[in-house]
Amino acid sequence: MNGLEIENLVVRAGGKTVVNGLSLKVPAGEVHAIMGPNGTGKSSLSKAIAGHPEYAIESGSIFLCGERINGLKPEEISRKGLFLAFQYPVDIPGVSIANFIRACLSARLPEGEVLNVPEYYKKLYEKMDALKIDRRFTSRSVNEGFSGGEKKRCDILQMLMLEPKFAVLDETDSGLDIDALRIVSEGINSARGSGLGILLITHYERLLHYVKPDMVHVMSGGKIVKSGGAGLARELEERGYDWISVPGGR
């Protein structure tokens, strides 16, 4: 299957099971959202998909565009076409945004090919303008001294430049004011229709006002306990999670 497919995934971290028999399919070109309260394993799932070494996959499989990626190093999974935007983006002092993205793109080129620098900067400035990122940011160190909104826009800039096959966006809406949320959402929406599959991880419906998901999944106890259309997010906003997460809840 083109896209992301997870089968009966069990993940341990910090001496406990954080993902417990989760299965999920997100076809290429679709946007799926995962919602759920704190501590249900949403961010743990994103890190396991990306190959974080502290999140050990005990059983189950993860497929990216039909290829099993279990056990691969994070950089190998990235080259296969996965992009992960962290809930808390890290600072990279001394490495400018322009050089960071340029290095990422160069690492994905076939051996012997060289990045076209003028074309690179033309595209970079176009994406920065769309995300309302000041062009002077190209010389600033990645995320250093950035506000929450600037960090999240920088993440989306990286996604748009790298053009991955699949993107996992872990609480991209956290810490954003209304204007920043709208700009980030427009950036995400601009990538739709290109065959890119997206898994949005969020607590709140507000992001889904701007980025309309094809499916919404509710995570509880380390697994998917309910799935539905966009209307499910509205119902969760109104009723909370207890009616789903409690066994036998209706």
Image (cartoon, rainbow, N blue to C red):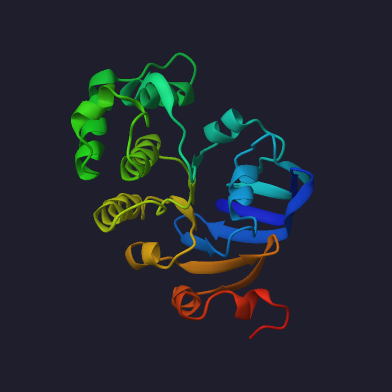
Above or below for 158 versus 216? above
Specify the quadrant of the image occupied by residue 204: bottom left
Q: Position of residue 89 (x, y in %)?
A: 45, 38
Describe residue 238's horizontal placement relative to residue 5 as left or right. left
Residue 124 picture location, percent across and down: 26, 31
Whether residue 139 is visible, yes or no, is yes
Residue under the image location 23 percent in, 21 percent down: 118
Task: Say which of 117 and 129 sits in front.
Answer: 129
Note whether 30 is above or below 227 in the view shown: above
Q: Nearer the viewer, residue 94 or 227?
A: 94
Q: Nearer the viewer, residue 122 or 137?
A: 137
Farthest bottom residue in view: 250
Q: Residue at x 71, y 56 (%)?
A: 7
Q: Give the residue at x 27% y 21%.
A: 139
Q: Report the number of numbered marks.
A: 0
- Quadrant of image for the N terminus: bottom right
In the foreground, 176 or 25: 176
In the displayed structure image, the side of residue 155 where residue 26 appears, left or right? right
Q: Picture coordinates of residue 234 (x, y %)?
A: 44, 77
Q: Which residue is pictured at 55% across the width and 58% down the height?
A: 26
Measuring from the top left, give residue 96's x and y in whole percent.
34, 22
Question: Which quadrant: the C terminus?
Answer: bottom right
Q: Is residue 10 something one can see in this rendering?
A: no
